[in-house]
Amino acid sequence: MTGGGMNIGLYIPHPQNSSLPLFPLQFLAQSKMAANNGVAKEGGLIVSFGEMLIDFVPTVSGVSLAEAPGFLKAPGGAPANVAIAVSRLGGKSAFVGKLGDDEFGHMLAGILKENGVSGEGINFDKGARTALAFVTLKADGDREFMFYRNPSADMLLTPDELNLELIRSAKVFHYGSISLIVEPCRSAHLKAMEVAKDAGALLSYDPNLRLPLWPSPEEAREQIMSIWDKAEVIKVSDNELEFLTGNNKIDDECAMSLWHPNLKLLLVTLGDKGCNYYTKHFHGTIGAFAVKAVDTTGAGDSFVGALLTKLVDDHSVLEDEGKLRELLRFSCACGAITTTKKGAIPALPSVSEVHTFLDASHN
């Protein structure tokens, strides 16, 4: 899901670590990722589970929904964004979820296909519509959302509709928390996680908190934390960290209060300060890039997609701080590029775009 009343987007401004390698060479030098504009399909499969929807983005920023003169139709939904981000960077990805058997639903399925994402895990619901979200863009690119989804098709996915063969083939299984809000999708989510974990997949979790969609903040916190100790890679924003811990002091101690024994990498995105990373052996901060943000929607998903594209075939980055910093710099660049265009999926970069961006930031 791409939004709520709480601003938890990843905005990427100024680079603060000029000593970092400008190009993550071990990441970018892979010829398979440069081929066909970064869409060669090799390596382990990343399966992304959850929602896909249509964002209606205003044609001008700084006005309310009622004042907006018009809207651009933009595909989105955090798990789908991640799947397409992976594919555009040369990774192999699939999406598991449910769409309405309507024009928007079939359009979204077509967009996944056009972007090289496997749709073998997609179901269509004849009785429910594809979810919609109307976006309010502030002058700085931040946003608020109004949702039309009760119930939308994504909420109605059942465990029996899961493509278990596809899920078992995942090397990384990625998910959020929107699919935990109501049944039957919650049971489908838990079943898919269990199947992926039993088959040996690395579990990746981005809660993507959207408070207006939950019955209460207490319910949101309880359900988000109910699966916390299953994931090996977790990404949260600073606002989500504050919400989950009840601590408004965003520091290492606060972040590490969410650490659990199964966790291999915890990432905290910090708005205009970049991101913090934590592993069992080291932790640190990666600075960010100066960009003119137009729309921050999807920036965090772009960041996660870049991370997983490398991580799926090389878990050694979790043990090598230099390699991890290179990868996170690349991931931050992907997030930064995504903020410079309206909409989530339309803004996700290819490898060649990231090359150009990093080269320009160097010069």
Image (tube, rainbow, N blue to C red):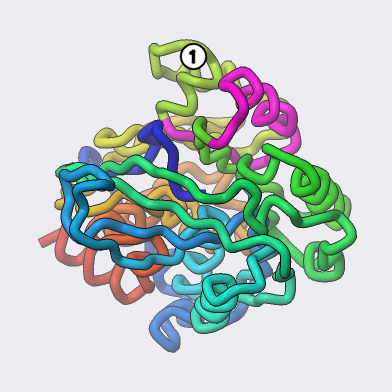
Could you say where residue 275 lies in the image, as x and y percent from the top left? 37, 37
Closest to the observer, 36 or 32 = 36
Give yes or no for residue 223 being in the magenta stretch.
Answer: yes
- Name above or below for residue 177 compared with residue 348: above
**In this view, 150 is above or below 123:** above
Residue 77 relative to residue 178: left or right: left
Residue reaching furthest to the left: 363
> x, y percentage for residue 354?
30, 67
Count of marks placed on residues: 1
Question: Residue sitting at 41 percent across and 46 percent down?
Answer: 325
Q: Magenta residues, as a range?
A: 213-237
Q: Name the residue: 82% across, 67% down.
A: 163
Percent across and percent down for residue 66 are 25, 47
Residue 350 painted magenta: no
Mark 1 falls on what kind of element? Answer: helix
In the depicted view, which residue is nearer to us: 301 or 153? 153
Can the viewer see residue 243? Answer: yes
Tell me the amino acid under the disc marked 1. Glu
| Horizontal and vertical percent position of residue 101 | 66, 72
Q: Residue at x 62, y 18 (%)?
A: 218
Q: What residue is drawn where x is 38% and y is 66%?
A: 74
Which residue is tagged 1? 253
Q: Nearer the viewer, residue 342 or 349?
A: 342
**Viewed as shown, does residue 187 lie left or right of 214?**
right
